[in-house]
Amino acid sequence: MRVPVRYLAALIPALSIACAAQATTPPVGRPISSRFNADPSPHWFPAAKGFYLYATDDASNSGKYWDSVTWRLYTSPDMTTWRDAGAPLAVTVFKWARPGAKAWAPEAAYRNGKYYFYAPVGGDKIGVAVSDRPDGGFVDARNDPLVDRERDVNAGDEPIDPAVFVDKDGQAYMYFGTRVPKVVKLKPDMISLDGPIRIVKIDGLPASDPRKKYGEAPFMHEHDGTYYFTFSSGWPGQILYATASSPLGPFTYRGVVIDYLKISTNHQAILEHDGKSWVFYHDALLPGGGGYRRSIAIAPLEYGADGSIKQVAVTPGQPND
Ligand code: FUB
């Protein structure tokens, strides 16, 4: 891929602070890589002492659909300088996957001294892989899907976009799904479902605006004792949020986190570390970018005194020249 010189020049200030000890925030709208990527799953892994960002690999798709078959990893010491750490795994790790099954929005979690990777495979199954390290060595943790549309009651039409949240009491939850948001508890082994798959209830979505509904990209985080459920409203999608006093809800709609982008999909993740909050999102930001050639960027996330999330002003992105 050809990258204009002016874009490379824009990266130089970021490189100069590669050794910064404290997490900083790159300018809003600046892609974390010159490689196309999407569907951010960011983490601070204390054992690895670094930021790890798993992504859908838009650089290896056909350009006509989200049909890549590998996931991508980026690492950072400080949130500003990101290194392309290659493909930590591919759909082929899952022997039950149909040949060529697409690799969509990934998720990861660290627990029990191991790294777990949650993988939407082919649009109808979610697999889980495990490794002793975050950057590779992943093997199928079960040898069958963790969620399977054909097998599991209430898995929904499209069990994709897994998001794992481990609460302070140690209980893990996995959110997923298109059009109807789902949640299921995970057992402490992180590779087994614990109880039924439930629908995430969101009250108060404004009837006056039918576009404000659940579409995809569920994500859960906790802040000051409140549980925040963020999600995309669809295609095109705004990132909306709802809050509750429990990770299982019911949730009350609160507002918009990120407005519509210039592409169809919108997909967020929120990371809190050292008292700072960031929202990761994707948009068409690089030359040649578009709906199937997306780029992940980062913006600071701020709260109001009442716990509301301030809408994030993402820039419209760099011109596609
Ligand atoms: O990357 C493929 C799909 O696009 C993801 O699963 C959705 O969240 C959307 O971002």
Image (spheres, rainbow, N blue to C red):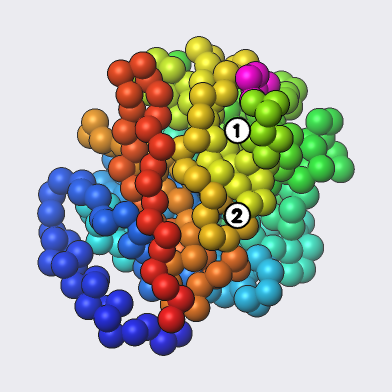
Q: Is residue 148 left or right of residue 140?
A: right
Residue sticking out furthest to the top = 245
Q: Residue at x 37, y 64 (%)?
A: 31
Which residue bears the numbered disc 1? 174
**x and y percent of residue 146 in the render?**
70, 41
**x and y percent of residue 181 in the render?**
68, 33
| Amino acid on which the number 1 mark rests in the picture | Met
Return the disc, 1 or 2, that comes first in the chain's sequence: 1
Q: Is residue 206 above or below residue 219?
A: above
Q: Is residue 103 above or below residue 128?
A: below
Q: Residue at x 65, y 65 (%)?
A: 66
Which residue bears the numbered disc 2? 265
In the picture, which quadrant includes the C terminus? bottom left
Q: Is residue 2 left or right of residue 203?
A: left
Q: Is residue 279 left or right of residue 209?
A: left
Residue sticking out furthest to the right = 150
Label 1 vs label 2: CA separation? 21 Å
Question: Is residue 84 in sight in this rendering?
Answer: no
Where does the magenta region start and end? Answer: 201-205
SS label for mark 1? strand
Q: Residue at x 24, y 31 (%)?
A: 275
**x and y percent of residue 237 in the render?**
60, 47
Q: Is mark 2 within 8 Å of ligand 1?
A: yes
In the picture, which quadrant includes the N terminus? bottom left
Name the quadrant containing residue 186.
Answer: top right
Q: Residue at x 33, y 27 (%)?
A: 303
